[in-house]
Image: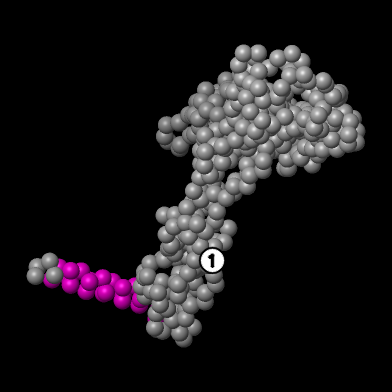
């Protein structure tokens, strides 16, 4: 039997009745027979019970009656994203992108569909190895591909959901990688490919990637340095001829292309022209740095012509430049939070160029300032009780402890001040003692304010 209405009788008066209504926080009458009906006492969507009193997907509502409103909750792991859930992949497991508490895990990208499950995939090149990634070194590191698979000739180790992989190649394993000029499956000298996997003088070696190099001593009848590529010269790997026998210009004195260069145009009628490639991570030619990109503000300029101010860069011949910001030079660059021109701690900017507690740093190269009244004792502040009012033990400018008070100070914490006789502590909501009470000090401040206003008015009149 359904209750049609809830009525209230008053002796010798009219009967008042409450009829079923969506959003009234009660379920009775015809509402009891409606499938999926709920009433949580409001007409707001996205809280489990919609504005038209229908149970929303991903929620379960219960408890509703003629006198009680429904209570709606989500269920993590049911495959439907709802409420505060960041994701819901239809299970309660971890390490698959969506955690057991329906939060997106680090290293994953998750996509959800309305009233449907979440699909998660690893984020390649973020320095976190998760899911089916074979490796993840972060961006721009040899050995781990752009799709986070281990490249041939490399081994990668150390990766985890919180740490990147480190990848190394092995000279002499018979698998040539692009950092090796050759790899003949041994580390012997005198066979064309040296123990460091470089081509030995007087030899030529094949250079297939991900395969074994074969080396030989060809009979070259042509003349290196004549500015022509003729005969068997065209068959020699990495051969070039720029019309000289000088090394360091892209084409070496023995007519091989040097690391970090690209040479082209050589023929029986013309010499090779060689150029460096800024941003390839191989320092060569007139490049002052090469950090593997063509971006400014990372230490090496976009055109590889200069090391930017505020940075210290380390160069390796035919290797990638590494740059670190110079803390203490007065120029804030990179990930420095501040740089006040020194590496002395205790002045607002630490020796690691991070902002110290209780300070604010606005301009690079300038001193950092404490903030009186922030409740963080720092620098030359004698006290800091979290306000800029007089008469509570700590002066308005934090420069003195006021007469008749004692303040307990601790670095990077708020000062706690009491009257000298110990009978009153302002701010504890307890009035005690018979002198230096907070009520008295409020009156003192009020009188000081009136005197100050009077002086200002007198000055304006004068």
Most extreme residue toward the left is 462
Tell me: residue 423, above or below residue 340.
below
Q: How is the image coloured?
A: one colour
Horizontal arrangement in the rendering, residue 354 relative to residue 434 (left or right): right
Against 394, residue 344 (above or below) is above
> Which quarter of the figure is the N terminus placed in?
top right
Location of residue 404 in the rendering, given as x and y in whole percent from the top left corner: 41, 84
Main SS of the magenta segment?
Answer: helix
Q: Which residues are magenta?
A: 436-458
Q: Is residue 457 magenta?
A: yes
In this rendering, the answer to whether 202 lies above or below 416 is: above
Q: What residue is shown at x 83% (from left), y 21% (from top)?
A: 218
Residue at image coords 65%, 14%: 267
Residue 95 visible somewhere in the drawing: no
Tag 1: Cα neighbours inside 10 Å, few (<14), some, or many (≥20)?
some
**5 sits left or right of 452 in the view:** right
Q: Secondary structure at mark 1?
A: loop
């Amino acid at each position: 039997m359904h209750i049609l209405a809830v009525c209230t009788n008053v002796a010798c008066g009219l009967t008042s009745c409450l009829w079923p209504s969506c959003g009234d926080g009660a379920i009775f009458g015809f509402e009891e027979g409606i499938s999926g009906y709920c009433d949580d006492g409001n007409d707001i969507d996205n809280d489990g019970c919609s504005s038209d009193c229908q149970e929303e997907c991903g929620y379960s509502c219960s408890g509703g009656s003629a006198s009680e409103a429904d209570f709606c909750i989500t269920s993590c792991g049911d495959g439907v994203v709802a409420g505060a859930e960041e994701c819901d992949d239809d299970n309660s497991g971890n390490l698959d992108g969506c955690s057991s508490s329906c939060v997106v895990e680090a290293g994953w990208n998750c996509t959800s569909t309305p009233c449907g499950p979440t699909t998660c995939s690893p984020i390649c090149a973020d320095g976190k190895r998760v899911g089916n990634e074979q490796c993840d070194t972060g961006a721009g590191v040899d050995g781990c591909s752009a799709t986070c698979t281990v490249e041939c000739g490399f081994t990668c180790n150390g990766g985890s959901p919180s740490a990147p992989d480190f990848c190394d190649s092995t000279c002499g394993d018979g698998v040539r990688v692009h950092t090796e000029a050759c790899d003949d499956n041994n580390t012997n000298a005198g066979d064309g490919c040296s123990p460091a996997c470089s081509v030995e003088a007087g030899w030529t070696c094949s250079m297939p990637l991900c395969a074994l190099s074969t080396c030989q001593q060809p009979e070259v009848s042509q003349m290196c340095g004549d500015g022509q590529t003729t005969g068997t010269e065209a068959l020699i790997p990495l051969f070039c001829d720029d019309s000289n026998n000088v090394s360091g210009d892209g084409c070496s004195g023995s007519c091989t292309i040097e690391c970090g260069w690209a040479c082209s145009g050589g023929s029986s009628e013309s010499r090779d022209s060689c150029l460096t490639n800024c941003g390839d991570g191989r320092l060569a030619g007139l490049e002052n740095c090469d950090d593997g990109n063509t971006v400014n503000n990372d230490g090496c300029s976009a055109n590889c012509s200069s090391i930017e101010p505020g940075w210290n860069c380390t160069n390796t011949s035919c290797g990638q430049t590494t740059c670190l910001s110079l803390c203490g030079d007065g120029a804030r660059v990179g990930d420095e939070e501040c740089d006040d021109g020194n590496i002395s701690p205790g002045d607002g900017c630490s020796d690691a160029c991070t902002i110290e507690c209780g300070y604010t740093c606005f301009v690079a190269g300038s001193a950092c300032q404490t903030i009186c009244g922030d409740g963080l004792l720092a620098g030359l502040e004698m006290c800091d009780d979290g306000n800029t009012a007089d008469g509570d033990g700590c002066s308005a400018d934090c420069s003195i402890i006021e007469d008749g008070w004692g303040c307990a100070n601790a670095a990077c914490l708020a000062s706690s001040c009491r009257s000298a006789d110990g009978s009153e502590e302002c701010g504890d909501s307890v009035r005690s003692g018979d002198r230096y009470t907070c009520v008295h000090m409020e009156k003192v401040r009020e009188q000081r304010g009136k005197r100050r206003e009077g002086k200002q008015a007198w000055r304006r009149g004068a």
